Image (cartoon, rainbow, N blue to C red):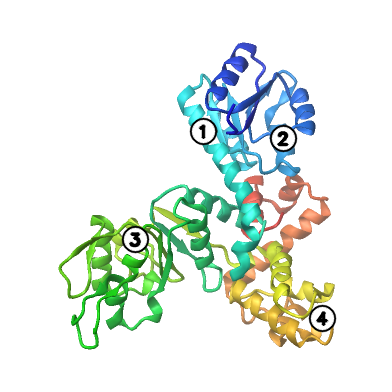
Amino acid sequence: MTDAGRVLIVEDESGLREGLASAVERLGCSSLAVPGLGEARRLLRDQSVDCILLDIRLKDGDGLDLLAELRAGPLRDVPVIMATAYGDSERTIRAMRDGAFDYVTKPFDLPALLVTVQRALEQRRMSREQRRAERPLAEGGGLVGSSAAMLVTWKLIGRAAASAAPVLVTGETGVGKELVARAIHDYSARAREPFVAVNLAALPAGLIESELFGHEKGAFTGASARRAGRFELAAGGTLLLDEIGDLEPSLQTKLLRVLHDGKFERVGGHETLDFRARVVAATHKPVHPGEPGSQLREDLYYRLAVIEIQVPPLRARRSDIPQLVAHALRAVPARAVSEAAMELLSAYHWPGNVRELMHVVERAGVLASGEIIDVPDLPEAVRNHAVAPDTDTERLSLREAVSRLERRMITDALQQTNGNRSEAARRLGIARAQLYAKLQEFGIE
């Protein structure tokens, strides 16, 4: 038996249960098959599994109840495929909302189901690798977190890494877009190939073409020798085109042609070279077709955004701030942050996102008189923001002010109901689905 993974099948129809077990084993996996929720719970207490195929309507209960238990406990990372003969929209929505990997209906399309199982096992493998590699990936600062918003980002990174398709990474300045690009590369089959990054906004317009495509000797004044460009240096690895939103239109046309044909020429040369690298583009500017301020060609956008990852701003994942602070402390003399200082750091709106947080903690850690960073060690802007969080709204946009009010009301409602989300939604006068969306938006767990 190969070590492809262990799959738990929870199905009360004995014939179907045995057939599914046999099919899963043909994938090279080991299978565990039980008829109900009670047996499944007992088995999961003693044994580890990599994927669960779970029927919803079982003789001893509702499979959605077990799904909720798994997502709230130590097995939250195990992918669960929900199965049912009743494909109603409410159960489908509930299953996916509560964290199911996928939802399949009976009678099964067995080949399609096995493909889904393989995808789930691959996600499990990627999740384990991500946990093992989270510290080295974070050394550049910032790609750390376990909030709902970052979980979405981690999942997209995993899916992008499994593909060779171009990726567009968007997000505000300082959120860690280059770190996302590096993670995609590090987890991909190209990890042993070069990772080459070029910041298009930092290059003079007249040098971008030579920087990207390279040039031949004598191609222009000062070209004293042949020089390989970033497209050539990337070889079979990953090429990050940072700040793609700043690329001038004529070069957008040339880039589109390279992406379409997979070929390019050095400036001043006639030799046609193959372009083999995977392209990841990043920008903090608007690039969606029709979006005000976008200067990116519509056809180039669709070529680059086969997979799009929007990196959340820090204010949308405040629960990650303690982890980020702990990461930043590794580089400074201070060893801890006082509770009062951490409250201020968590309350600040961080317009510069993770990059600003890292700078603030590093500065405070160097200036602190002892091993603990306290309130006086923090910049005035951070201290003032949290001293009067409800009245200091003059510098906020309407959207930020409303967002702050929504977050506080939701937090208060959850505290008043001891975490009962249904009751909190009722008190707030919104649907449960709206509350779940807001919890994810604000990074409230």
Specify which label sits upstream in the sequence, 4 or 2: 2
Of circles 4 and 2, which is in front?
Answer: 2
**Pointer 4: what residue?**
374
Tag 2: amino acid: Ser
Quadrant of the rendered structure where residue 413 is? bottom right
Specify which label sits upstream in the sequence, 1 or 4: 1
Specify which label sits upstream in the sequence, 1 or 3: 1
Residue at left offset 66%, top offset 46%: 432
Image quadrant holding the C terminus, namely: bottom right
Measured from the top left, where is residue 396 in percent x and y? 61, 77
CA gap between label 1 and label 3 equals 30 Å
Quadrant of the rendered structure where residue 335 is? bottom right
Q: Dot 4: what SS?
A: loop
Specify which label sits upstream in the sequence, 3 or 2: 2
CA gap between label 4 and label 2 equals 43 Å
Of circles 3 and 4, which is in front?
Answer: 4
Of circles 1 and 2, which is in front?
Answer: 2
Specify which label sits upstream in the sequence, 1 or 2: 2
Q: Which mark is residue 275?
A: none
**Pointer 1: what residue?**
116
Image quadrant holding the N terminus, namely: top right
**Pointer 2: what residue?**
48
Is residue 226 found left or right of 20 in the rendered image? Answer: left
Tag 4: amino acid: Asp
Residue at left offset 49%, top offset 22%: 110
Residue at left offset 76%, top offset 43%: 73
Of circles 3 and 2, which is in front?
Answer: 2
Mark 1 burial class by Cα count in 10 Å: few <14, some 14-19, many 20+: some
**Pointer 3: what residue?**
301
Tag 1: amino acid: Thr
Measured from the top left, where is residue 163 in percent x and y? 43, 48
